[in-house]
Image (tube, grey):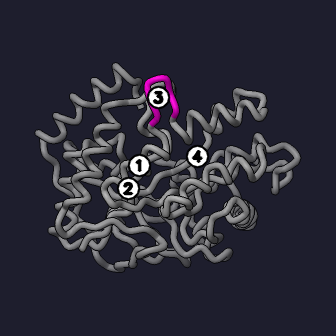
Amino acid sequence: MTAVYITIDTEYAAGFAARGVLSAADRRENFRLSIEGRTDSGCAGIGYQMDVFERHGLKAVFFVDPMPALVWGIEAITDVVGPIIDRGHDVQLHAHSEWLALSGSQNPLGGRTGQNMADFTFEEQCEILAYASQALVAAGAQKPVAFRAGNYGANDDTLRALAEIGIAYDSSHCPGIANSACRISLGPEDRLPLRHCGVTEVPVGCIAGAVNGLRHFQLTALTDREMVAALRHARDEKQPSITLVSHSFELLSRDRRSVNHIVKRRFERFCAALSGLEGVGHATYRSAPPTPFAGKVAEPLPPSMLRTGLRYAEQAIANVVYGAR
């Protein structure tokens, strides 16, 4: 059985907050757009995503960013965590360090700010992660066992800091993005869970690119045809697991003002296919955490000109109608 980890990075938009005055009204609007995904053309945020998961008997991992509590208090995170816990899905830790620049006197590092976790020292990262973990628990979640850095912007010190505060898994290494903000000392060939710097690193899935390189296993990066083909390939190659990335706002247009019906249908078709795919199941970090497979290499799904061509066409339409991602 190949386990699929459906992971949803669930976060308020720091960019939206930076343009506002950080009032309670700003928080409500940010929640509406980034978490609820509520637009004039319908809702497609985490509530809708959980509706679809539950329709198909699936459980997901919601990596929730508690850093906005520095600006709006724990209630802002409780509003996110509560519905996920109530509906039986897995809450784990996410963190965008950009919020430190908005936090004023609440900054746990004093005046230190940075775009990514890798911009901070080991000791500073320990402080950030300890604060974020405690805030997530204060919001109603269990103590997290897994983490993903905002923007994938972790380094080896991040992993050491996770080990220091007792978080056993990280999923910040993304082999399918060659120039990501990730600074973990792993390469594109590291595509299966492995032990690294004191934790189990769980790479984001990927497929082979049509020309060269890799393409990451994300809802807006691949069509449902490609994702399902990748699952069949992983199963046939006896790969133990594969990780899909999405976001709380991923089914919306780029400006988050309308539902992106192309990506929404892609999501619905993927969940329906996964629920009926023999030899492939879903898993969470609570129900069945990933197992490291040292020394093994996962061969990615080979390229297909047909699948790639269909994606180009679909993405072109989506970019025109809903804005490029």
Disc 3 marks a residue whose amino acid type is Arg
State which quarter of the image contains the C terminus: top left
Q: In the rendered image of this protein, does residue 262 appear above or below residue 195?
A: above
Is residue 183 visible in the rendered image? The answer is: no
Q: Label 2: which residue?
A: 54
Is 42 magenta? The answer is yes
| Residue at 47%, 48% in the rendered image | 180
- Distance of label 3 from label 4 (alpha carbons): 15 Å
Magenta region, residue range: 38-43
Q: Secondary structure at mark 2?
A: helix
Disc 2 marks a residue whose amino acid type is Glu
Label located before the other in sequence (4 or 1): 4
- Distance of label 2 from label 1 (alpha carbons): 5 Å
Q: Label 4: which residue?
A: 11
> Circles 2 and 1: CB distance less than 8 Å?
yes
Q: Label 3: which residue?
A: 254
Q: Secondary structure at mark 3?
A: loop
- Distance of label 3 from label 2 (alpha carbons): 26 Å
Disc 1 marks a residue whose amino acid type is Asp
Q: Label 1: which residue?
A: 51
Label located before the other in sequence (4 or 2): 4
Label located before the other in sequence (3 or 2): 2
Disc 4 marks a residue whose amino acid type is Glu
Which mark's residue is nearer the viewer, 4 or 1?
1
